[in-house]
Image (spheres, helix red, strand yellow):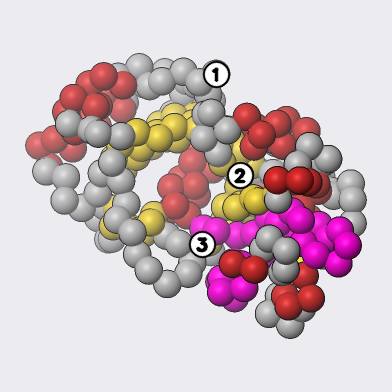
Amino acid sequence: MDEIKPTAYDLMEFHVEALFTHDRNMRLHTINEPWPGEAPAPRFFLGRTVEGTAICRFRHDVPEKLIEQLKELCADEPAVTDFRTKPKHFEAYMNLLQGERFTMGPCYLVPGDVAPSLQVVGITRENMTEYLRGGFEWLASEIDYTQPCIALVRDNRAVSVCRSVRITSRAHEAGLETLDGFRGKGYAAAVVAGWAASVREAGRLPLYSTSWDNLASQSVARKLGLLFYGVNFTVT
């Protein structure tokens, strides 16, 4: 997988494929969560890349006429350099869709040479009772669905965990959680690095995305030198 060197456009395509289920017409249906239960996908997804290319996807119930209008605007989006910058046609998207809420945030690829700076362990059904206590008990019900799941352990309990929360045959998206009392110690960066290595071992690409206002998550991306390839934007 490493030898292919995907473009920013490829990575954005892998990203949207991982986030949502699609039908044959590439219309969105549900959020692609690996555990049971299906929440509806947003009505509109826009992925702007650092190369100046953009991907747009629409939920299956968005009218064709509206889709054509939105596609024209998407094609006019410039390359993104700052993930805090809203899309050029932000107001038009919100007005046309009569949008109530939007999300936006940077998207990264975890490079192949990233390695954990601290010792981490894989959490599975076999060892979860040993580690998932004192804060991560809730993870037990999802453990079979979110592999690989990598944790940093202190006093024989998991205090920081990174796991696959969106999964396809080409890429996994990271889900990162660190207990309150253990933040700011470099633990999150270590588990992301360990998770990414496991994902690559399985022949998939490790993707990491967050929201524009999640400073802690962006700090992890900076520490690890993650490769910024674009910004996602959705309207519900």
Q: Where's the C terminus, which quadrant?
A: top left
Q: Residue at x 64, y 59 (%)?
A: 163
**First reached walking from the N terminus: tag 1 or tag 2:** 1
Estimate the spatial distance between the alpha carbons at disc 2 and disc 3, rounded to whole Å: 14 Å
The residue under label 1 is which amino acid type?
A: Thr
Evaluate if marks 2 and 3 touch, with contact meaning CB atoms under 8 Å apart: no
In the rendered image, is residue 179 in sight?
A: yes
Q: Position of residue 160 (x, y in %)?
A: 74, 53
Q: Position of residue 110 (x, y in %)?
A: 69, 44
- The answer for how far apart the CA atoms under marks 1 and 2 are is 17 Å
User: Mark 2 vs mark 3: which is more N-terminal?
Assistant: 3
Looking at the rendered structure, which numbered label has been put on residue 208?
Answer: 2
Q: Nearer the viewer, residue 108 or 75?
A: 108
Image x and y of residue 99, in percent: 23, 33
Distance from disc 3 to disc 1, alpha carbons, whole Å, reads 28 Å
Q: Quadrant of the N terminus?
A: bottom right
Q: Decide whether residue 159 is among the magenta residues.
A: yes
Q: Earlier in the sequence, mark 3 or mark 1?
A: 1
Q: Which residues are magenta?
A: 139-166
Tell me the tag on residue 168: 3
Tag 3: residue type? Answer: Thr
